[in-house]
């Protein structure tokens, strides 16, 4: 039973500490929309999403009112479109036609983002995969709500370096086509190693082929709640610190479990997972970097940062797993720069560099996220940064990702304003020593020896 103290405690988390359900994401399989005619595919996709997601936004708002829990976003993820359009799309423009259909139906059902304009190419690319990847810049520049992702590697298959090289060019082209909006298109493009099938968070969400026809996945976030709890045990031992994070993560996850179960009931859609990821926002007090400072660092990026982040990530996962039988997605701590005021402060103070962020990604939930870099950065340099991050995921058997934004026309020392949950970011310097000869090699980096577990 929940006692009155716990009710009041949860109310305080919501009202004073920025606890929210970041997203209810409805996953929809589009495999039954496949056809040899691209117009028919678009028609099938529109009809299915319109039917399945008709009540999603209304249900989310009703649950939010009923339980008094803010539900910030209602979103949709779909089967990777490279698979759905493989039989019908003969050109990149055919895939863009599907992207525009997805964007149209996303607007009509009222969701803020639709993810799944994606390709899974960790070992090699089909012709359809390559066409979709090459269509990404145009698709993201001509739509508002579409998010794209590409899985470039895995622990089982290695890293597809041909795709890594291509993606460096695609990121640059996307930046150019959306330069009037400070290259915002790149904020809707994520590349992964070991991408999960059930991630509810954008821009990387897609509905995996192992999933059912429809599923509800919920992402819940509360960096401010964790920081507030740690303030009460300032100076205590690591044992007390860990126990506090774990108990707090348990309480936060229970809120997500409650919302997920109710959304499943209202929409008559199976419940999938709760993703407990400490996802920051630009709001003051809603920062993962501030948690690291509360643990004992002057700034995120100071010596000890990677150890502190490893501790935080592990205890969040332990608390979440105890709170729900279905914890999944990415679950842990996100370290985006533009979306976290504490990270921005650390960059401006000179405490945090891309290289230190890369080290931190070895122990956190995702990777190099929402990092703005000079617009004149070479495509091969971007590919090299991506390859490094894919290697971390591959060797450590974890999900890693890169969402990097070369802001056309801006350089180090300037700032870019994205707005809303995406916040703003200082342009960070990159290592410009050449990796051209490495990136331009053809083929695949083989899987590590520990991948052979069959």
Image: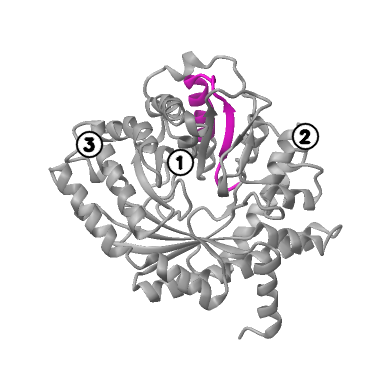
Mark sitting on residue 349: 2
Q: Residue placed at 30% from the left, 43% from the top?
A: 99
Residue 375 inside the magenta-drawn segment: yes
Please give the name of the residue rendered at 42% of the width and 41% of the height, measured from the top-left corner: 452
**Residue span colored magenta:** 364-391
Q: Quadrant of residue 138?
A: top left
What secondary structure is marked by label 3?
helix
Is residue 351 among the parts visible in the rendering? no
| Displayed quadrant of residue 13 | bottom right
Q: Quadrant of the N terminus?
A: bottom right
Image position, residue 56 (x, y; %):
38, 66
In the rendered image, the vertical position of residue 152 relative to residue 63, given as above or below? above
The residue to which callout 3 is attached is 94
Between 92 and 309, the residue placed more toward the observer is: 92
**Front residue of 433 and 325:** 433
Q: How many marks?
A: 3
Q: Is residue 439 left or right of residue 91?
A: right
**Distance (Cα) linking label 3 and label 2:** 47 Å
> In 3D space, how far apart are the residues under numbered discs 1 and 2 (Cα atoms)?
28 Å
Rounded to the nearest angstrom, the CA distance separating label 1 from label 3 is 20 Å
Residue 67 lies left or right of residue 151; in this view the side is right
Provide residue 48's location: percent of width, then percent of height: 24, 59
- Give the residue number, with chain letter if any, for mark 1: 188
Q: Magenta stretch containing residue 392, yes or no?
A: no
Other residues around mark 2 within 10 Å, as few (<14) / some (14–19) / many (≥20): few
The answer to whether the residue labelled 3 contacts the one labelled 2, judged by CB atoms less than 8 Å apart, is: no
């Amino acid at each position: 039973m929940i006692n009155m103290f716990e009710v009041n405690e949860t109310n305080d988390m919501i009202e004073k500490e920025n606890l929210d359900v970041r997203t209810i994401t409805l996953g929809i399989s589009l495999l039954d929309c496949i056809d040899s005619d691209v117009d028919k595919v678009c028609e099938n996709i529109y009809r299915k999403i319109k039917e399945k997601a008709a009540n999603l936004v209304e249900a989310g708002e009703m649950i939010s009112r009923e339980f008094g829990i803010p539900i910030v976003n209602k979103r949709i993820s779909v089967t990777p479109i490279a698979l759905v359009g493989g039989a019908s799309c003969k050109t990149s423009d055919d895939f863009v036609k599907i992207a525009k259909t997805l964007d149209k139906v996303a607007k009509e059902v009222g969701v803020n983002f639709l993810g799944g304009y994606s390709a899974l190419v960790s070992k090699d690319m089909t012709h359809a995969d390559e066409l979709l990847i090459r269509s990404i810049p145009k698709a993201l520049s001509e739509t508002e709500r579409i998010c794209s992702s590409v899985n470039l590697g895995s622990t089982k298959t290695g890293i597809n370096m041909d795709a890594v090289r291509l993606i460096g060019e695609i990121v640059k082209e996307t930046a150019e086509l959306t330069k009037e909006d400070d290259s915002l298109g790149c904020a809707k493009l994520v590349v992964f190693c070991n991408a999960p099938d059930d991630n509810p968070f954008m821009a990387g969400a897609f509905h995996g082929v192992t999933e059912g026809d429809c599923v509800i996945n919920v992402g819940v976030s509360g960096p401010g709640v964790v920081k507030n709890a740690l303030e009460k045990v300032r100076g205590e031992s690591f044992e007390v610190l860990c126990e506090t994070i774990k108990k707090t993560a348990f309480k936060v996850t229970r809120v997500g479990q409650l919302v997920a179960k109710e959304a499943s009931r209202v929409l008559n859609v199976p419940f999938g997972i709760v993703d407990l990821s400490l996802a920051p926002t630009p709001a003051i007090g809603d920062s993962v970097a501030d948690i690291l400072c509360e643990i004992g660092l002057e700034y995120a990026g100071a010596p000890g940062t990677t150890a502190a982040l490893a501790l935080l990530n592990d205890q969040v996962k332990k608390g979440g797993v105890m709170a729900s039988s279905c914890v999944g997605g990415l679950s842990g701590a996100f370290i985006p720069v533009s979306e976290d005021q504490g990270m921005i402060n650390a960059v401006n103070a000179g405490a945090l560099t891309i290289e230190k962020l890369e080290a931190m990604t070895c122990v956190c939930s995702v990777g190099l996220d929402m990092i703005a870099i000079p617009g004149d950065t070479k495509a091969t340099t971007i590919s090299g940064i991506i390859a490094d991050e894919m290697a971390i995921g591959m060797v450590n058997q974890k999900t890693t990702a890169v969402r990097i934004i070369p802001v056309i026309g801006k350089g180090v020392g300037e700032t870019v304003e994205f707005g809303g949950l995406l916040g703003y970011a200082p342009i960070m310097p990159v290592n410009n020593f050449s990796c051209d000869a490495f990136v331009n090699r053809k083929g695949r980096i083989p899987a590590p020896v520990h991948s052979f577990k069959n």
